[in-house]
């Protein structure tokens, strides 16, 4: 291996050829401040346009300062990361950025979580010497995401996520010079674009330029209305991340405290989306087996592979980008929508609550869920199955607002009947989890045999595209997994070209699946956090007594009492949906 | 431009002498001879050596040795390489590339084919701004004639070498003259520069090794190969060989394109070729290097023009813009004018160029509108230095040059603006003061009746008075007064 010798801040160091100054410095404990740069290890995601010029360092013999994030080391290089020239330039560049940024930090939704704010603090900026005109743009509000572009600092992270990772291609730089800004083409509104609301732009935005639409005040209003019964469901990935907002180490499971906090917030019933995830498996698994048996009987028209349909951003993605393939995904609604539908029918009838008096709130790791619950097909006479979807971050702010000391809360259990779940429901929160849950059930229904093992390690991990073959009683079931819409696109193109070997494919829009969702506590570019959340999800699964959806007693009861059997007519009208060509 | 013994035409050798729409005209003046010789008699290495020995440096502004660039691109291994001609000429007032493409398009085509042969590329691209319709038309005619004659296409001169050229249009962004931005624009991406390395010669258009040269650089190639490296390198200074085309403009008697050997002094250019300053006014400064060059004073008039001397003097060669200023020009306003241009043309990718230039412009605007403070001058210098030190591409790294060089050479003018509230050249309107000389005023009321803002008052047949707080310095009173009773200070 070729190595390079250099010194950084008088420390000699030997690194691999091709290493950047930033990485080399990090290796010996020198932290060079960055702003636009972001690298998510293992996910193959890196943003380094070299645009912010915060990470500049002095390289001996070089005329100007070098950006550490994109300058590769060379033999004999002498780097100074904090000479007076560097510090002065870095502060001046920071002052310039701040001179074109609103100073409404106190009321900014990103306050306390803003990379720009922390950097200004780190660089000791106490005065802006170069004041002048500030850019102003109109605010753009969509069903899920707000663009407050006055706060854009042109780091281009959102653009990289939208184009390179997600291949959605909505956000890109427009205009020149001082007027340059990241925007949809022709400055159109986000809701007129092909945006999927995956929220990955929000997840990586270092400032308050991109945030979720906040629904907390609507939730508070519902909770304080005595005429309403307000129930809540929480998605699997929330319990693996919420703790981070209260000082817990990433990957700490806070399920019990989460339930406790929701009860103290005043929700009448605290339920679990995992229950609906188990229900999803019953429907989707059955659909898979139906298509599979038709295929094995020689039906050439059967649509295979079947694609999962739990992820609303993924659904919107194929409706825009691959409408010709809208018959392929499973027709099963997402767990959030199955929950809403069952809550406002089965549960409401059971409890004798009028539909309009029942408010369903969901706590989601996702911003696209806000859009999903507003889709017309998920409404009955204008009343939505799920009234409000709030993100993990919004829930944290609600808990803080209500003076609830989260860390001191006792662990409590979910309410029934919509609160019981199996380990299969839990793993919906990570990439690979839905398909693993489906395999656990489909295998047993298909082979009529008990699974010899429940942990399918071959389906787990962080690789963007993964595949495995599971032996279904002699039939090799080929399974594909993609997370990140760019990876999904690759699989879809193969299907379209007739080159796909898969029978079933799980697709999640966000890198890492829901644990990396756009509504989760900010990871600030640290991919370790995502991995720890993933491990927490699998730990929760392991701790469950029941780990197969079809063994959930409340699911069995739901079918017995109400739905009949999976894919029944009633199940179809309540739990399935259709897709639209949005081109 | 009048011919003058100080001038020597190499790049412009055919302009005006041939009909650019007739390939035979070009051939009759040794056209395509160099290409023929290269393909049939010389190896690429020999040809590259000849270019290296000639000492030719890039005429687009950077001054990078052309032969060396070719050699690096040749050594980059790849199944596909490209030759790109940068015809995105954008400096205000500069039109040498346009003149070459309009007057002698074949010289560029021939040179690109030679370059293709040398670096191992079979495809050339001309990136030309769409605002040059005649140049585009003539280039298209020339390309089809060259194809017809077998000088482009397959098996040129039966050498087995294939080469053809495509035209790509630029939408008039100055920054697309920067080679990485140019390449991105050709790829259909936003015209923004990216960090180098990798240099285009290693990874350029579509990720393949790409040799980018400017029009004028290419136009020199056939002449060098026909007459030899020794001939070319005998012209010019020690480190800058050959000639340079300049677009002479401003307060000078003869404006237009000139081509002079490197080493000619600014005095020779301005006084002998340019015929001196217009209306017998006093020379004040000459701005070279386009919007990011510097303004030089009389102290530099005897400096021989070459890449290194201009940089030492605080300016640069650039693509060859040369604007002469006289005593009526305000140097603060000139700096502001150039900043306005770079401000408009910055792509906005890096913070110092996007916001820093805006702030520089705002400070200059403050000074020229009479609100300047003493510390603004230091602020300009400090900010300029940081912008130069931290910007991503050549545009930002040089955009503060007009500010720095005018402060260095004309600090007294800045001081007059901020300390005395005066513009010595009388250009900054906000600093002008119109006053009525009581003794000369007859009270005719003409000024009173013409003032658009009612700033003038007074009784008929009595001296009038201008209220300075209302005056918008439009100068109407000054023009209308028949008794020279209004002064301007």
Image: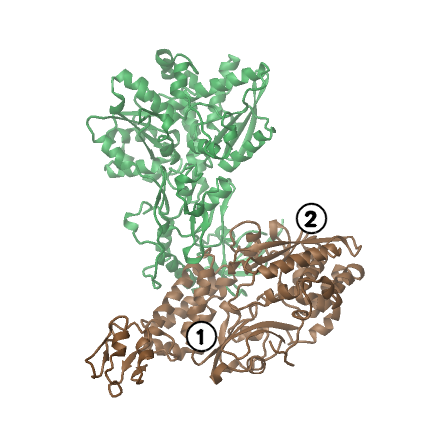
Chain colours: A green, B brown
Element class at badge 1: helix
Q: Position of residue B313 (x, y in %)?
A: 52, 76
Give the chain of mark 2: B
Q: Position of residue A24 (x, y in %)?
A: 52, 52
Asked if residue B408 lies left or right of residue A132, the reply is right
Dot 2 corresponds to which residue? B79
Q: Residue furthest bottom?
A: B439
Residue in the image at 31% along x and 54% along y = A103
Element class at badge 2: loop
Q: Position of residue A548 (x, y in %)?
A: 44, 19
How would you rate the neighbour count of disc 1 (Cα within 10 Å): few for under 14, some for 14-19, many for 20 or more?
many
| Residue A399: quarter of image | top left
Sequence order check, earlier mark of 2 and 1: 2
Q: In the image shown, does A61 or B192 lie closer to the viewer?
A: B192
Dot 1 corresponds to which residue? B406
The relative height of residue B356 versus residue B79 in the rendered view (above or below) is below
Asked if residue B16 lies left or right of residue A134, the reply is right
| Residue B137: quarter of image | bottom right
Q: In the image shown, does A272 or A561 lie closer to the viewer?
A: A561
Task: Identify the mark at residue B120; answer none if there is no mark.
Answer: none
Give the chain of mark 1: B
């Amino acid at each position: 291996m070729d190595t390079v010798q250099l010194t950084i801040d008088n420390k000699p160091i030997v690194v691999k050829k091709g290493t950047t100054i930033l990485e080399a410095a990090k290796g010996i404990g020198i932290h060079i401040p960055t702003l636009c740069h972001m690298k998510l290890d293992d996910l193959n995601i890196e943003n380094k346009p070299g645009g912010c010029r915060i990470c500049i360092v002095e390289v001996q013999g070089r005329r100007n300062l070098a950006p550490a994030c994109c300058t590769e080391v060379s033999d004999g290089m002498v780097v100074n990361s904090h000479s007076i020239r560097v510090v002065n330039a870095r502060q001046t560049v920071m002052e310039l950025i701040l001179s074109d940024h609103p100073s409404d930090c106190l009321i900014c939704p990103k306050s306390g979580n803003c990379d720009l704010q922390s950097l200004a603090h780190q660089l000791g900026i106490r005065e802006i010497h170069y004041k002048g005109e500030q850019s102003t743009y109109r605010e753009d509000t969509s069903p899920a995401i707000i663009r407050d572009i006055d706060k854009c600092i042109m780091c281009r992270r959102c653009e990289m996520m939208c184009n390179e990772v997600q291949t959605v291609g909505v956000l890109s730089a427009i205009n020149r010079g001082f007027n340059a800004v990241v925007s949809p083409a022709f400055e159109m509104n986000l809701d007129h674009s092909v945006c999927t609301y995956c929220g990955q732009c929000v997840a990586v935005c270092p400032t308050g330029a991109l945030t979720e639409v906040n629904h907390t005040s609507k939730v508070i209003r519902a909770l304080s209305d005595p005429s309403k019964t307000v129930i809540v469901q929480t998605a699997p990935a929330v319990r693996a991340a919420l703790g981070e907002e209260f000082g817990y180490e990433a990957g700490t499971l806070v399920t019990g405290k989460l339930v406790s906090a929701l009860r103290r917030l005043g929700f009448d019933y605290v339920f679990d989306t995992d229950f609906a995830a188990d229900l999803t498996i019953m429907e989707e698994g059955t659909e898979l087996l139906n298509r599979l048996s038709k295929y094995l009987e020689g039906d050439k028209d059967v649509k295979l592979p079947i694609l999962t349909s739990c992820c609303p951003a993924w659904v919107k993605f194929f409706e825009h980008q691959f409408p010709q393939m809208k018959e392929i995904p499973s027709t099963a609604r997402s767990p959030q929508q199955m929950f809403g539908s069952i809550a406002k029918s089965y549960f409401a009838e059971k409890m004798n609550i009028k539909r309009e008096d029942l408010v369903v709130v969901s706590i989601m790791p996702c911003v696209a869920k806000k859009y999903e619950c507003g889709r017309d097909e998920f409404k009955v006479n204008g009343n939505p199955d799920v009234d409000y979807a709030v993100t993990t971050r919004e829930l944290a702010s609600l808990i803080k607002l209500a003076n609830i000391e989260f860390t001191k809360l006792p662990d409590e259990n979910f309410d029934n009947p919509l609160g019981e779940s199996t380990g299969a429901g839990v793993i919906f929160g990570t990439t690979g989890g839905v398909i693993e849950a489906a395999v656990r059930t489909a295998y047993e229904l298909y082979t009529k045999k008990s699974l010899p093992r429940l942990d399918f390690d071959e389906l787990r991990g962080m690789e963007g595209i993964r595949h495995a073959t599971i032996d279904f009683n002699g039939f090799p079931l080929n399974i594909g997994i993609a997370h990140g819409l760019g990876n999904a696109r690759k699989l879809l193109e193969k299907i379209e070209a007739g080159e796909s070997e898969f029978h079933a494919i799980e697709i999640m829009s966000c890198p890492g699946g829901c644990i990396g969702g756009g509504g989760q506590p900010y990871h600030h570019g640290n991919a370790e956090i995502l991995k720890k959340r993933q491990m927490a999800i699998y730990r929760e699964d392991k701790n469950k007594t029941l780990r197969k959806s079809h063994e959930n007693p409340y699911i069995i009861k739901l079918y017995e009492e109400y739905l009949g059997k999976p894919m029944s007519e009633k199940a179809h009208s309540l739990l399935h949906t259709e897709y639209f060509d949005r081109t | 431009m009048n011919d003058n013994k100080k001038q020597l035409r190499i790049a412009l050798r055919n302009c005006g002498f041939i009909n650019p729409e007739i390939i035979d005209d070009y051939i009759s003046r040794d056209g395509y001879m160099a290409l023929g010789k290269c393909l049939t008699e010389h190896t690429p290495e020999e040809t590259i050596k000849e270019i290296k020995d000639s000492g030719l440096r890039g005429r687009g502004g950077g001054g990078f040795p052309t032969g060396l660039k070719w050699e690096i691109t040749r050594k980059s291994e790849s199944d596909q390489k490209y030759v790109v001609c940068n015809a995105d000429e954008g400096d205000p007032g500069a039109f040498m590339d346009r003149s070459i493409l309009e007057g002698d398009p074949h010289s560029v085509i021939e040179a690109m084919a030679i370059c293709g042969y040398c670096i191992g590329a079979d495809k050339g691209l001309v990136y030309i701004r769409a605002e040059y319709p005649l140049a585009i038309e003539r280039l298209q005619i020339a390309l089809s004639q060259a194809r017809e004659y077998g000088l482009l296409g397959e098996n040129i001169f039966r050498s087995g070498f294939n080469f053809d050229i495509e035209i790509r249009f630029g939408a008039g962004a100055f920054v697309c003259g920067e080679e990485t931005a140019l390449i991105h624009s050709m790829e259909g991406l936003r015209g923004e520069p990216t960090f180098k390395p990798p240099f285009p010669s290693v990874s350029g258009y579509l990720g393949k090794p790409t040799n980018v040269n400017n029009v004028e650089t290419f136009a020199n190639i056939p002449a060098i190969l026909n007459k030899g490296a020794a001939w070319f390198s005998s012209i010019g200074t020690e480190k800058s060989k050959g000639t340079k085309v300049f677009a002479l403009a401003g307060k000078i008697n003869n404006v237009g394109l000139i081509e002079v050997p490197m080493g000619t002094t600014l005095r020779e250019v301005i006084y002998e070729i340019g015929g001196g300053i217009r209306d017998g006014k006093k020379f004040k400064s000459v701005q070279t290097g386009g919007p990011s060059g510097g303004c030089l004073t009389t102290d530099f008039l005897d400096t021989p023009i070459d890449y290194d001397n201009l940089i030492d003097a605080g300016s640069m060669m650039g693509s060859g813009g040369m604007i002469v200023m006289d005593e009526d020009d305000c140097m603060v306003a000139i700096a502001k004018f150039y900043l306005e241009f770079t401000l408009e043309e910055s792509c906005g990718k890096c913070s110092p160029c996007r916001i820093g230039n805006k702030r520089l412009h705002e400070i200059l605007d403050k000074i020229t509108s009479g609100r300047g403070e003493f510390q603004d001058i230091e602020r300009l210098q400090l900010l300029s230095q940081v912008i130069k030190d931290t910007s991503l591409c050549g545009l930002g790294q040089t955009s503060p040059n007009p500010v720095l060089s005018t402060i260095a050479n004309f600090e007294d003018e800045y001081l007059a603006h901020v300390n005395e509230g005066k513009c010595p050249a009388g250009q900054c309107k906000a600093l002008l003061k119109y006053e009525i000389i009581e003794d000369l005023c007859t009270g005719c009321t003409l000024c009173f009746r013409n003032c658009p803002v009612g700033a003038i008052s007074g009784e008929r047949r009595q001296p009038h008075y201008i209220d300075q707080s209302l005056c918008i310095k439009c100068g109407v009173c000054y023009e209308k007064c028949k008794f020279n009773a209004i002064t301007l200070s």
